[in-house]
Amino acid sequence: MIYDRRPDDFERINTPELAQRFIDEQVAAVKEQVGDKKVLLALSGGVDSSVVAALLIKAIGNQLTCVHVNHGLLRKGEPEQVVEVFGKELGANLVYVDATDRFLDKLAGITDPEEKRMIIGGEFIEVFAEEARKLEGVEFLAQGTIWPDILESEDGIKSHHNAGGLPDDLQFELVEPVKILFKDEVREVGKALGLPDSMVFRQPFPGPGLGVRCPGAIIRDRLEALRESDAILREEFAKDGLDNDVWQFFTIVPDFKTTGIKDGKRAFEWPCVIRAVNTIDAMTAEPAELDWPLVQRLTERITNEVPGINRVLWDVTPKPTGTIEWE
Ligand code: XMP
């Protein structure tokens, strides 16, 4: 059955059995909706689009084409994981577009955070539309819309960013198989579909990606320092078992330099900021209380291993007054 809305008596999906029942229902529903036609999906590697991709591969196999646009602002290892899991393990029809240069060229010299967001969002649609035009006979667009997206767009809190945005010559019928689910239910379904935990339990990651953590005009060296320091942070949090305890954690590399010393010589380099927060709904947030040995280990590794970083700072600001992201 294709649901338009979440029924009042819908049983919360919190066991593998309930997840499997939902998967079986949706596989049948998608087959009926799509028939032998082709479906397109923008696969970011985030939880929602990944679960939709895995579900549709099960339902319609190669009638689905997934497009993964790497805008150059993803975290270390993310595009590779999408290619590994969907392209290789699940055998998806995957189009991987490395659009890094396109995005970074457009962003060159742009310092205003909102302008950066607009450029990233606009360019994303353009790259995706170009790929869609190359494919013949696609009639459906699959989306990882979930129930809170629909509620929030009805309440006027935010526009339902998944829907629309594509140019007029690209109008598709929508396939939204997880649209009546809450996030925790999407995760349960993802687990039952066999997706790796690192994908299913991923912390939230903003659409503009590392772009909003590289304040001011983005340059490649600083972006690389950001990506490497973020990877070290994630590794060390995982070692301490914090990856499921702390709601969101990442680094920021601001666009100024300070004096330091490396190998007995003056090193005029960027600082790296640690941000780790706990929250229920991201409307307010508290800094996570990190153990001092972890902070020391992070400082040691980041300053030693990441070129261009000579200092580590820890952002202990709650929201408000600070937002979670820096831009
Ligand atoms: P802020 O910085 O507003 O972030 O306290 C709250 C949550 O939203 C995420 N965030 C975004 N997500 N596009 C997104 O998809 C964005 O432009 C964006 N900006 C912030 C942020 O990571 C945090 O979880």
Image: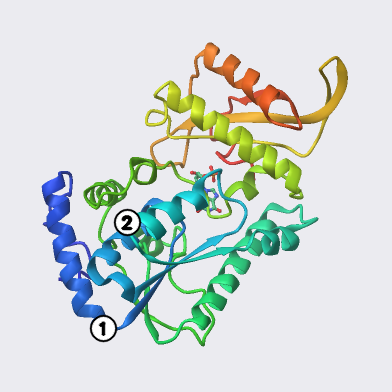
Q: Secondary structure at mark 2?
A: helix
Quarter that holds the N terminus: bottom left
Residue 23 percent across, percent down from the top left: 18, 59
Front-lying residue, 175 or 326: 175
Say which quarter of the image contains residue 55: bottom left
Residue ranking furthest to the top: 293
Residue 12 vs 280, above or below: the answer is below
Residue 127 vs 117, above or below: the answer is below
Q: Which mark is residue 148?
A: none
Front-lying residue, 233 or 150: 233
Query: With 3 as the anchor, is 263 left or right in this view?
Result: right
Say which quarter of the image contains residue 152: bottom left
Other residues around mark 2 within 10 Å, as few (<14) / some (14–19) / many (≥20): many
Query: With 73 as the anchor, is 180 left or right in this view?
Result: left
Residue 85 percent across, percent down from the top left: 38, 53
Pointer 1 residue: 36
Residue 283 is at least partly visible in this image: yes
Residue depicted at x 73% and y 54%: 112
Marker count (numbered) = 2
Residue depicted at x 76% and y 52%: 111
Residue kind at label 1, given as amino acid type: Asp
State yes or no: Cβ of the residue under disc 1 lies below 8 Å from any atom of ligand 1.
Answer: no
Sequence-wise first label, 2 or 1:
1
Residue depicted at x 20% and y 69%: 3
Pointer 2 residue: 51
